[in-house]
Amino acid sequence: MRTPSWRKLFKGASIQRDLEEVRDLFIRYFKEQTIQPLKDLGRFVAFGALGSIFVGFGLVVGLLGVLRMFQWLFPVLDGTLSWIPYLIVVILALAVGALVVQRIFAGTSRRMKDDR
């Protein structure tokens, strides 16, 4: 008598093989659901930090350029009035900083509104 074809599937089955399959499935799931998102988040943070450094450096160089422009364009601000270009640049830097903070909080409140 011939063995039915469905019994061939169970012939090599063992608890050891089932446990190995469950372990492999768990490891694959763990890597897919935890390690890969952490790698993606790390990449996102790294590029964000690098971009922030470049933008900050550009802002400092730009403000220094504005300071030098005021000093060059208005020679009347030499001597006792030499502090005025510095004051203008500080006010400009504070305005840019306030704009950045306002945009950060505006984005946060908009995201919170969308979550509701």
Image (cartoon, grey):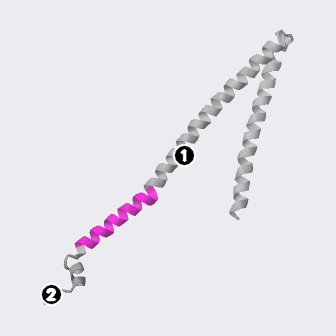
* Kind of element beneath mark 1: helix
* Numbered range of the magenta stretch: 16-34
Q: Nearer the viewer, residue 92 or 73?
A: 73
Indicate the amino acid at tag 2: Arg
Disc sitting over residue 44 in the figure: 1
**Residue furthest left in the image:** 1
- Report the residue marked by disc 2: 2
**Residue furthest front in the image:** 2
* Kind of element beneath mark 2: loop
Q: Residue at x 77, y 25 (%)?
A: 89
- Among numbered discs 2 and 1, the one appearing first in the sequence: 2
Left or right, 32 with reference to 81: left
Q: Is 37 one of the magenta-colored residues?
A: no
Percent position of residue 67, x then y: 76, 20
Indicate the amino acid at tag 1: Phe
Left or right, 82 with reference to 8: right
Percent position of residue 55, x then y: 64, 33
Q: Is 32 one of the magenta-colored residues?
A: yes
**What is the CA distance from the residue labelled 2 to the residue labelled 1?**
61 Å
